Image (cartoon, helix red, strand yellow):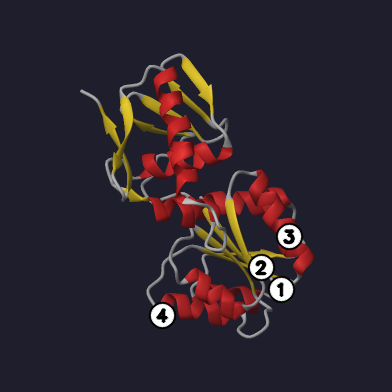
Amino acid sequence: MKLLVVEDEVALAEALSEILKRNKYAVDTVYDGEDGLDYALTGIYDCIILDVMLPKRDGFEVVQELRRQKMSTPVLLLTARSDTEDKIHGLDCGADDYLTKPFVSGELLARVRSLTRRRGEVVTDAFTFGDISLNKSTFSLSRGNDVVKLSLKEYQILEMLMVNPRQLIPKERFIEKIWGYESDVEYNNVEVYISFLRKKLTAVGSTVTIKTARGIGYFLEEKK
Ligand code: CA
């Protein structure tokens, strides 16, 4: 899951990013409404945490513009004010939820979880494909009783593959989602993690394999 934090108070932005990263989200942070809008419009985020009072463009304008451009990414607005009118205005602009500062991290995480839950998704702790299951809370991969732990990057890559099984995912997409645009990660880093994941799939004796579309990307396949 990749999140965008738009917050001009640097200390708060960093604290938010820290909490979210500790909870295994990939996070990009920007500090004004203009950058917020540009980043959000890339469409690579699963949820946007958007402060209301921002330089250049405020949070209301940003969410309004996103909705005008048909971007349906869930938006959680943050504000220092608890006025009901502000809340109504935010929701009218197209925000999905609202959190008043100061808030505790548990509340933030609960809102983000609820906003990123896909429609129609069965609310469980695991993704499944073929004979494997990927546990979202323990970051483990299992087949029957065989279980291996995954590193954060391994987990994020396998999650992307399992959310869209059989769909070819370009290498660039993994980099955008997991490392972010500004990282200078080489493509072969993705290859390294893919090779770790293949070893772990073999270790649990799965019939699921990660196939390579040479020069393009990867997809999951179940060996018959
Ligand atoms: Ca602010």
Which numbered tag is attached to residue 8? 1
CB-based contact (under 8 Å), mark 4 and mark 3: no
Pointer 4 residue = 68
| Mark 1: few/some/many CA within 10 Å (<14, 14-19, 20+) | some
Say what amino acid the circle numbered 2 marks: Leu
For mark 2, give the secondary structure.
strand
Task: Name the quadrant containing residue 108.
Answer: bottom right
Mark 1 CB near ligand 1 (8 Å cut):
yes
| Sequence-earlier tag: 4 or 3 | 3
Pointer 3 residue = 14
Real-space Cα separation, disc 2 to disc 1, in angstroms = 11 Å
Real-space Cα separation, disc 4 to disc 3, in angstroms = 29 Å
Q: Name the foreground residue: 97 vs 66.
A: 66
Which numbered tag is attached to residue 129? none
For mark 3, give the secondary structure.
helix
Say what amino acid the circle numbered 1 marks: Asp
| Residue 187 x %, y % | 45, 50
